[in-house]
Amino acid sequence: MAFDIKICGLKTEEALKAVLDNGASHVGFIFFAKSPRNVSPDEAGRLREAAKGRAKAVAVTVDADDAFLDEIVAKMAPDMIQLHGKETPERVAEVKVRYGLPVMKAFSIREAADFEAMAAYIGIADRMLFDAKPPAGSELPGGNGVSFDWRLLAGLDASVDYMLSGGLNAANIGDAITLASPPGIDISSGVESAPGVKDDALIDNFFRAVRAARESSAA
């Protein structure tokens, strides 16, 4: 089975090149005004051109209305839409039908009971994303650099396709892969030198750590 690596919150050509050259399977562009990683649909459309044929481009939104999604899809032409807000199963289904694109639905996790919300989305969302619940006071649904107990994923049905997110970095990705064996991972702040500023060295280190962890697991 393919192992997917999504680098999210990309804003510059340099950062995009670094993640593509390292073999990222997905690149994420965030459309949320409160995020330091926020980009406009025009900016994302320009950047995603370099990803064509190399990685899937994901539009990350938070409770976006149809008008904003229309603009994003028209200007960026994403391969997938990620819904990272309080979108209902009905809303996920609407988005899939309206744009004819696969949808990834994000869930905030702190304890085992938090996975229960996912049940209503099975068969509707194409993929799940499990992120850590934001710390108190944060206005960001993701990208907070915090993680949850990855051992909780051991109780997950093996048929659930998901990406693991939240607080991943080069130092802990080996533990995440060993404990959870996720089919995909998603990282943003863990390869940044400051909020919203991707760092080429941190990106390289992260991918090296992923490769080492996967080689160790295979052995």
Image (cartoon, grey):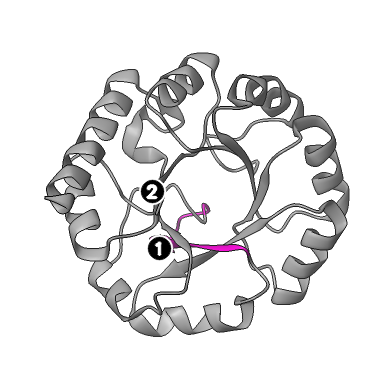
Span of residues in magenta: 126-140
Residue 205 visible at all: yes
Q: What residue would you read off at disc 1?
A: 136
Instruction: Please say if 118 is above or below 85.
Output: below
Tell me if mark 2 has few (under 14), some (14-19) or many (20+) residues whose alpha carbon lies within 10 angstroms of its own.
Answer: few
Q: Residues within 10 Å of mark 1 (few under 14, many from 20)?
A: few
Q: Name the main secondary structure of what is drawn in magenta.
A: loop
Identify which residue is drawn at 46% across, 31% down.
Answer: 196
Residue 138 among those drawn in magenta: yes
Residue lying at 34% horizontally and 19% vertically, measured from the top left: 200
Q: Position of residue 157 (x, y in %)?
A: 41, 79
> Where on the picture, by quarter, is residue 21?
top left
Left or right of 43 on screen, residue 113: left
Figure quadrant of residue 42:
top right
Residue type, numbered disc 2 = Phe
Residue marked by disc 2: 3
